[in-house]
Image (spheres, rainbow, N blue to C red):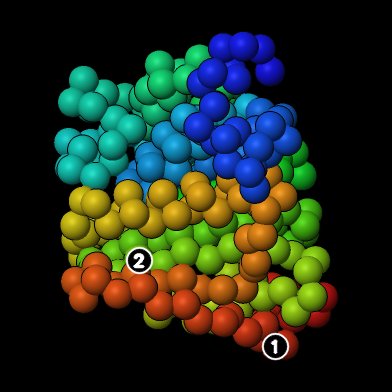
Amino acid sequence: MDDAALLRYSRQILLPQFGYDGQERLVAARVLVLGLGGLGSAVALYLAAAGVGQLLLVDDDRVDRTNLQRQIAHTEADVGRLKVDSAAARLRALNPLVNVEPLAQRLDGAALDALAGQVDVLVDGCDNFATRFAVNAASLARGTPLVSGSAIRWQGQVCVFRPGTPDASCYHCLYPDIEEVAEACAHTGVLAPLVGVIGAVQALQTLKLLAGLDAPGGRLLSYDALQGRWRQARLRRDPACPACGGR
Ligand SMILES: [Zn+2]
């Protein structure tokens, strides 16, 4: 890191648990952010600001005016533009030291699998369960940690999955029944800052993973925004899970 980088990241480097070594790890890291909606906007902005060296942004969607209420990486001038291009421009303006790679595709299992082998952490903020299960499978296949987040109505949740650690559970253990959970903000609504709260926690957990700080897997952190209450639950591995049960 040169003097400009040391100055930019000085408030993190000051933290004794993080320090120069932690920052060096961030600068050397590559993270895939899946989905540049409400969660992905908050995740990507914080990861870029904090100095994660390479950010791979994946989303095939375009910015719609109804997105602007909560998807803070995009502005009025971006309506109609690819979300990855809009977000990439915003992140480069925020921190020119970060290398941002936009990928405007809906990735299938094989492509996700290949990418999972090339990044240090997978961050999932996508809006459909087919992709969520495909990312989980890629995380398991490559042993890449997955930081999963979701937010709907007044409820948000975050979970870190660390394949390969003892008794590691996976996303599929959490949602054995796909049909039950197939809802999206488009139909149910969400208050703007909730996606920011959850996305910021996803970014925080990602930074801790990258810096080698304690970020245990298999703990489901849930936030009820209406009641103003956080809860933490231990997520048990499902021995019959079709994704990780045989491992
Ligand atoms: Zn599982």
Within 10 Å of disc 2 (Cα), the crowding (few <14, some 14-19, many 20+) is: many
Amino acid under label 1?
Ala
Give the x, y percent position of residue 101. Answer: 57, 25
Q: Earlier in the sequence, mark 1 or mark 2?
A: 2
Which of the numbered marks, if any, corresponds to residue 101? none
Q: Secondary structure at mark 2?
A: strand
**Front-most of 122 and 176?**
122
Query: Relative to residue 207, is residue 247 drawn left or right?
Result: right
Secondary structure under the numbered disc 1 in the rendered image: loop
Can residue 196 be seen by looking at this rendering? yes
Question: What mark, if any, has residue 240 been given in the picture?
Answer: 1
Disc 1 vs disc 2: which is toward the camera?
2
Q: Which residue is drawn at the image coordinates 59% and 63% (left, top)? A: 160
Please give left or right for residue 142 compared with residue 211 in the image: right
**Mark identifier at residue 156:** 2
Residue found 23% across the figure and 27% down from its top: 75
State how many labels appear. Answer: 2
Alpha-carbon distance for marks 1 and 2?
Answer: 26 Å
The answer to whether 119 is drawn above or below residue 233 in the figure is above
Amino acid found under the numbered disc labelled 2: Gly
> Residue visible at 48% across and 53% down?
202
Q: Is residue 26 visible?
A: no
